[in-house]
Image (cartoon, grey):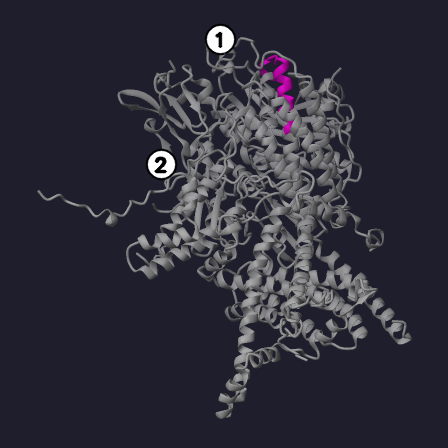
């Protein structure tokens, strides 16, 4: 039967687009024939602002890129600048950094799980996810005083040392979290309707996934055993025992399971880091430019000057953020401000593959597949 | 021998010079040869194109390609130098699908034309936006406003009178 | 529909139902976790970055905070014959860079978060609202 | 000499203006609302009806589901177990603006998004309120120097309550809602429709 | 034997000795029918108030249940434990601006909410709330209920069509497809019971379930017809349009489905209709499979009161299950739902019918 094609606009304000994204769908009844993604509704010009701020002042802006996992963003940026200026970071600072990074990975995946299940129509998992997220945020608030936009990393170290009683609280959280993950799995993993919605939906095989630039858990769901923490080890990851979580099925369900496994793996890392936290400085004592002030109020002030000028050069650094490969391309011209900051955001590149996944499926499948690639619009549009 | 020198051996005509970008092999490619060089790079096993970006150096543009190989676990950076007047370079979107969006983004924000790109339109800013923001000579003073047309498309103008509220 | 022949017993859904039932009746350490603001308040961490306050005696009005602020939240204004910072909390990032930068350690960020107001002008916190005097215990 | 006697029973104790969040919230219960109606000037009946309807309105503010950026995540956090917006009867997030009373402008309003936000606001049925959340929506905040960000959402739609923070923590958010309840309480019936003026 | 609520009222009035004088008063003017009308109107008003209160309570309960599952409190501030919340919602919705979109068909757009609200109330007419607590014991009660609830797709289609909105239209189309494909297994499952009882009257169906086996197991049809019960339950949840089958709204896909464009009072009518329908369908499940008002007879308390209590307890148990299910499972996809309906439930229902009629003919049960 000849039928007219229906043009459907989803978004930019739509409950299932995780923010302000717009799908232009060409539909044949309920079947998607073509999908065009329109974005830029949250384009805030972060890269241009990077050229207008000093190296230190840009750190709060990295928080607001991928606001669900601000700490890895912070880290990727300071890592780039540290590589550029060749700064050694003290061991304790690296341990604290890895601790915060992995905690943030758990937070990110909790929100991922919740919003995915919410998109599928069940409302309970998101509440449970946010219940545990709140506990993790309380830990963060103890550590750096903010809930989402931490601005905790500093070039050459971290802003503040661990507060008293942080490690015991962290251990409580880990213990609690392990129990809760069992709850989630009972609620979601075996649920027949959930499997029906997720299995064999949004299939993309390994070669295609690489070609479409997918990274992170989304790529590992397609069976590519790859993790930047393993391939190009940075920070203290070489000393830590963990494994990259890989699933072979290439569908939405595999991508979901990879993230659930990663949560457990992160808990494992957290426990190791908490047990072996060394003593020492939290920020580098390398001198840059001016001598440290004596009797300065905070550690950051004592060791690191406000005016920081790395040598001329350029660097591209990649890190494994919870959503995938997060890279910062920083060009310095020897002044106090970066000449150019380019952010290679994981969400932007993962989103490229979405139309490929969902052509020929239905709107509910679009939502399921879209949920499993786990994007954040702040990261896509920057 | 690193990947950049390997590339230079394979295609001596295309590679201008090689070097290092901190710890990553860097090869500067002639503008005309980028498509061929990219094909060669893909053959060499660099299956992941991490990032394409353009930088405005006031007198020239540089386009930078970052590659990574999942098999060999190696990095490679390619660089193309363009003149400042009408920067354009061949598109590699036919080889890597992800290049499609990355090139659109570079076109949008830096204003480099990628010839042979299937759909080179703005991606982050609305169509009709005046100027490319990441150029150093971008005019930050004039404010541009976006209003909505009949079918929901964006109309850019410097006049925000029908959008802004009188207060 | 091979699916239904395999899963006719719907064990997964049963498991899920049991977990939710445990939550309804709070079985096995699954309590209500709500903190009923404003009847009860969550304990704030001492490092929490809320509203700024400036030590009246320590502040020298040097303007380093103004320079270090990423987006120009801070303005130095004259108040009672001395120079003090004025914070436009309507555009503040609450990043804490001014606290780090202050050479006299005069800026604090305290736990004040009840800042909502009816007009944009009232979000500008001038010296009259942020200054405090350190109490000296003898 | 005659001493002037003052009849103490005739002096009404001045009603204390609620200041803390708790007092404000206690002041907006149904009974309190109806009692407060007596103190209003004008016709007792109408002002009581006013108060009753206002009570209905501020007790059941249904927000429209429209998150823009970072603050939208805190919006989710407010709805969730630890802070529980549902206690105020506000968990009924309506995806359709027609059924919503309240819009949270939660996040950066970019130039490209501004006409959509305005349209969304215009689609909402009267009476409607707007709470601007976070620095970006209040003034442009971190992105005030950016080329693509609108400098404050009050440039395009009227805003009732501003909540500073980047993003504001959930309690600050709830305080903003209590402020809005305060504001609605003092409105007469039809004030939103312009009938009283 | 008191057959329905009218006769009950008459019985009570004569028991306290005021029926005859009143009746005599009306007879003087030759208007006996007037008294009859007055009593029936009072009955209907009582029913209406009861349904409205139930709907309010249900919407509160739903929010509370939802909250408890998710480790939070739910409505707390509006009244004690948020009990006044539905009242506040009602007041607010009445005062909202009533928007009719520019491209909409005004008449149909306005008419559609009434078409869903009225059938939701009509279903209660042959529903026995207790022994003799029934407005009218229609001899085709069950058929009437199924037929009336099948009217709701009409309203949904009208609403979706008149809204002139793609999401509304898609929601309406889905709702109609779903309702049609689930009314059939619903009816087929009910017919198995009807064959067993030999009557379509709801009262007869309940009476057939009185008594116990071995003094312990109640003679409810859930034990006689377990397959029919499961089919009926699934089909009812689909009819109610609740998760996992809430395609007519499906917020994440279609914004708010067919009532995307409705605001104010018209939206409130859909809201009320939905909960009234939910209560009605739960009542039907109880009547057909869970023994209706039957239960142990207590001394000194009139059977009308105990039966009403039993009925309400059972109905709330079914509603509890529906809410509990809603909190647990995600939504299915529309084609999966239709597959389930047409390819599994209808064959199963037919098979069940075949086995039942065979056993009945053979005289085994």
Q: In which quarter of the image is residue D178?
A: top left
Q: Which of E254 and D99 is in front in this view?
A: D99
Question: Which SS does the magenta portion mostly show?
Answer: helix
Q: Is residue B117 visible?
A: no
SS for callout 2: helix
Q: In this view, does B68 lie above or below D106?
A: above
Q: In which quarter of the image is the N terminus of chain E?
A: bottom right
Q: Which of B24 and C81 is in front in this view?
A: C81
Q: Position of residue E205 (x, y in %)?
A: 74, 73
Residue A93 on the magenta segment? yes
Q: In which quarter of the image is the C terminus of chain E?
A: bottom right
Residue D92 on the magenta segment? no
- Asked whether disc 2 touches disc 1, contact meaning CB atoms under 8 Å apart, the reply is no
Magenta region = A83-103
Q: Which of D25 and B30 is in front in this view?
A: D25
Q: Mark 2 points at which residue?
A: C122
Find the residue positioned furthest to the left: D1
Q: Where is residue E174 in the image (x, y as percent from the top left)?
A: 67, 61
Question: In the displayed structure, does residue E298 sit left or right of residue C79?
Answer: right
SS for callout 1: loop
Question: In the displayed structure, does residue C22 sit left or right of residue A294?
Answer: right
Crowding around mark 1 (Cα neighbors within 10 Å: few <14, some 14 to 19, many 20+) is some
Q: Mark 1 points at which residue?
A: A292
Q: Can residue A332 be seen in this view?
A: yes
Crowding around mark 2 (Cα neighbors within 10 Å: few <14, some 14 to 19, many 20+) is some
Question: In the displayed structure, does residue A85 sit left or right of residue C10?
Answer: left
Chain for disc number 2? C
Q: In which quarter of the image is residue E154?
A: bottom right
Q: Position of residue E258 (x, y in %)?
A: 59, 61
Between the C-alphas of marks 2 and 1, the distance is 39 Å
Q: Are both tags, 2 and 1, on one chain?
A: no
Q: Which of A61 and E95 is in front in this view?
A: E95
């Amino acid at each position: 039967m000849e039928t007219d094609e229906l043009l459907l606009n989803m978004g930019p304000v739509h409950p299932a687009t995780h923010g302000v994204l717009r799908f232009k769908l060409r539909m044949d009844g309920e079947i998607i024939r073509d999908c065009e993604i329109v974005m830029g509704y949250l384009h805030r010009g972060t890269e241009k602002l990077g050229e207008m701020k000093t190296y230190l002042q840009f750190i709060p802006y990295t928080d607001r890129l991928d606001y669900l996992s601000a700490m890895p963003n912070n880290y990727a940026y300071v890592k780039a600048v540290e590589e550029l200026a060749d700064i050694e970071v003290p061991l304790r600072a690296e341990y604290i950094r890895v601790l915060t990074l992995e905690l943030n990975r758990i937070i990110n995946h909790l929100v991922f799980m919740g919003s995915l299940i919410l998109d599928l129509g069940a409302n309970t998992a998101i509440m449970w996810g946010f219940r545990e997220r709140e506990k993790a945020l309380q830990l963060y608030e103890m550590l750096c005083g903010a809930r989402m936009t931490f601005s905790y990393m500093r070039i050459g170290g971290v802003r503040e040392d661990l507060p008293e009683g942080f490690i015991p609280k962290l251990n409580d959280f880990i213990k609690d979290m392990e129990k809760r993950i069992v709850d989630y799995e009972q609620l979601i993993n075996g649920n027949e309707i959930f499997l029906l919605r997720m299995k064999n939906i949004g299939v993309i095989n390994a070669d295609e996934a690489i070609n479409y630039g997918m990274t992170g858990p989304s790529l590992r769901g397609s069976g590519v055993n790859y993790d930047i923490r393993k391939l190009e080890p940075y920070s203290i990851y070489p000393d830590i025992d963990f494994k990259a979580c890989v699933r072979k099925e290439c569908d939405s369900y595999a991508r979901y399971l990879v993230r659930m496994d990663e949560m457990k793996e992160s808990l494992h890392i957290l426990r190791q880091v908490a047990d072996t936290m060394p003593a020492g400085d939290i920020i580098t004592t390398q001198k840059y430019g001016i001598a440290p002030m004596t009797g300065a109020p905070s550690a950051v002030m004592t060791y690191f000057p406000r005016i920081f000028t790395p040598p001329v050069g350029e660097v591209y650094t990649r890190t494994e953020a919870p959503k995938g490969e997060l890279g910062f391309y920083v060009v310095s011209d020897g002044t106090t401000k970066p000449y150019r900051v380019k952010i290679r955001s994981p969400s932007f590149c993962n989103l490229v593959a979405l139309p490929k996944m969902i052509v020929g499926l239905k709107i509910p499948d679009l939502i399921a597949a879209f949920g499993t690639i786990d994007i954040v619009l702040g990261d896509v549009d920057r | 021998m690193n990947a950049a020198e390997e590339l230079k051996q394979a295609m001596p005509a295309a590679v201008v010079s090689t070097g290092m970008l901190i710890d990553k092999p860097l090869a500067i490619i002639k503008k005309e040869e980028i498509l061929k060089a990219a094909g060669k790079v893909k053959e060499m096993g660099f299956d992941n194109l991490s990032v394409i970006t353009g930088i405005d150096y006031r007198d020239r543009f540089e386009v930078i390609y970052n590659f990574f190989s999942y098999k060999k676990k190696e990095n490679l950076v390619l660089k193309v130098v363009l003149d400042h007047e009408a920067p354009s370079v061949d598109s590699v979107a036919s080889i890597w699908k992800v290049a499609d969006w990355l090139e659109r983004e570079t076109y949008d924000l830096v204003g480099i034309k990628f010839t042979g790109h299937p759909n080179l339109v703005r991606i982050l800013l609305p169509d009709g936006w005046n100027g490319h923001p990441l150029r150093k000579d971008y005019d930050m003073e004039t404010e541009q406003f976006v209003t909505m047309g009949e079918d929901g498309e964006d109309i850019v103008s410097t006049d925000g009178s029908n959008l802004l509220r009188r207060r | 529909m091979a699916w239904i022949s395999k899963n006719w017993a719907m064990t997964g859904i049963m498991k899920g139902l049991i977990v939710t039932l445990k939550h309804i009746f709070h079985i096995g350490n699954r309590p209500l976790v709500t903190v009923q603001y404003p009847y009860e308040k969550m304990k704030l961490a001492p490092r929490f970055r809320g509203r700024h306050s400036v030590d009246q005696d320590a502040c020298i009005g040097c303007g380093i905070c103004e320079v270090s602020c990423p987006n120009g939240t801070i303005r130095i204004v004259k108040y009672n014959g001395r120079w003090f910072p004025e914070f436009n909390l309507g555009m503040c990032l609450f990043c804490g860079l001014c606290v780090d930068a202050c050479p006299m350690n005069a800026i604090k960020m305290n736990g004040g978060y009840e800042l909502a107001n009816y007009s944009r002008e009232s979000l500008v916190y001038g010296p009259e609202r942020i200054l405090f005097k350190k109490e000296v215990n003898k | 000499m005659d001493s002037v006697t003052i009849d103490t029973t005739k002096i009404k104790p001045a009603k204390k203006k609620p200041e803390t969040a708790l007092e404000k919230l206690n002041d907006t219960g149904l009974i309190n609302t109806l009692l407060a109606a007596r103190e209003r000037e004008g016709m007792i009946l109408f002002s009581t009806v006013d108060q009753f309807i206002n009570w209905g309105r501020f007790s059941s503010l249904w927000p429209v589901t429209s998150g823009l950026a970072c603050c939208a995540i805190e919006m989710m956090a407010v709805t969730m177990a630890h802070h529980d917006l549902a206690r105020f009867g506000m968990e009924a997030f309506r995806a359709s603006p027609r059924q919503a009373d309240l819009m949270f402008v939660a996040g950066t309003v970019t130039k490209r998004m501004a006409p959509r936000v305005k349209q969304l606001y215009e689609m909402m049925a009267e009476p409607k309120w707007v709470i601007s959340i976070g620095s970006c929506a209040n003034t442009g905040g971190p992105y005030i120097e950016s080329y693509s960000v609108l400098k404050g959402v009050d440039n395009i739609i009227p805003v009732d309550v501003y909540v500073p923070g980047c993003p504001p923590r959930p309690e600050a958010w709830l305080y903003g809602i209590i402020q809005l309840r305060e504001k609605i309480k003092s409105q007469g019936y039809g004030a939103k429709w312009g009938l009283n003026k | 034997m008191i057959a329905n609520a009218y006769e009950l009222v008459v019985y009570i009035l004569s028991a306290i000795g005021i029926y005859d004088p009143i009746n005599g008063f009306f007879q003087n003017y030759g208007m006996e029918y007037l008294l009859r009308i007055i009593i029936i109107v009072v009955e209907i008003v009582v029913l209406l108030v009861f349904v409205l209160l139930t709907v309010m309570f249900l919407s509160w309960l739903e929010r509370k249940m939802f909250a408890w599952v998710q480790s939070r409190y739910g409505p707390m501030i509006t009244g004690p434990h948020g009990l006044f919340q539905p009242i506040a919602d009602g007041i607010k919705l009445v005062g909202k601006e009533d928007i009719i979109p520019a491209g909409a068909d005004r008449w149909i757009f306005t008419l559609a909410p009434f078409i869903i609200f009225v059938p939701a109330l009509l279903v209660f007419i042959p529903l026995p709330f207790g022994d003799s607590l029934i407005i009218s014991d229609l001899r085709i009660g069950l058929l009437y209920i199924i037929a009336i609830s099948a009217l709701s797709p009409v309203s949904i289609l009208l609403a979706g069509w008149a809204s002139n909105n793609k999401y509304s239209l898609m929601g309406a189309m889905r709702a109609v497809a779903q309702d049609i494909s689930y009314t059939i297994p619903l009816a087929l499952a009910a017919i198995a019971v009807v064959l067993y009882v030999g009557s379509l009257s709801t009262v007869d169906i309940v009476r057939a379930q009185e008594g116990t086996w071995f003094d312990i197991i109640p003679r409810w049809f859930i034990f006689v017809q377990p397959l029919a019960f499961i089919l009926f339950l699934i089909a009812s949840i689909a009819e109610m349009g609740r998760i996992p089958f809430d395609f007519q709204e499906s917020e994440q896909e279609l914004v708010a489905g067919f009532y995307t464009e409705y605001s104010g009072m018209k939206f409130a009518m859909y809201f009320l209709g939905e909960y009234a329908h939910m209560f009605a369908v739960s009542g039907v499940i109880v009547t057909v499979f869970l023994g209706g008002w039957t239960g142990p007879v207590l001394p000194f308390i009139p059977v009308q009161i105990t039966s009403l209590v039993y009925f309400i307890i059972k109905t709330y148990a079914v509603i509890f299950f529906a809410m509990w299910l809603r909190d647990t499972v995600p939504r299915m996809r529309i084609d999966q739902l239709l597959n389930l309906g047409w390819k599994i439930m209808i064959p199963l229902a037919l098979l069940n019918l075949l086995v039942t009629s065979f056993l009945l003919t053979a005289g085994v049960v």
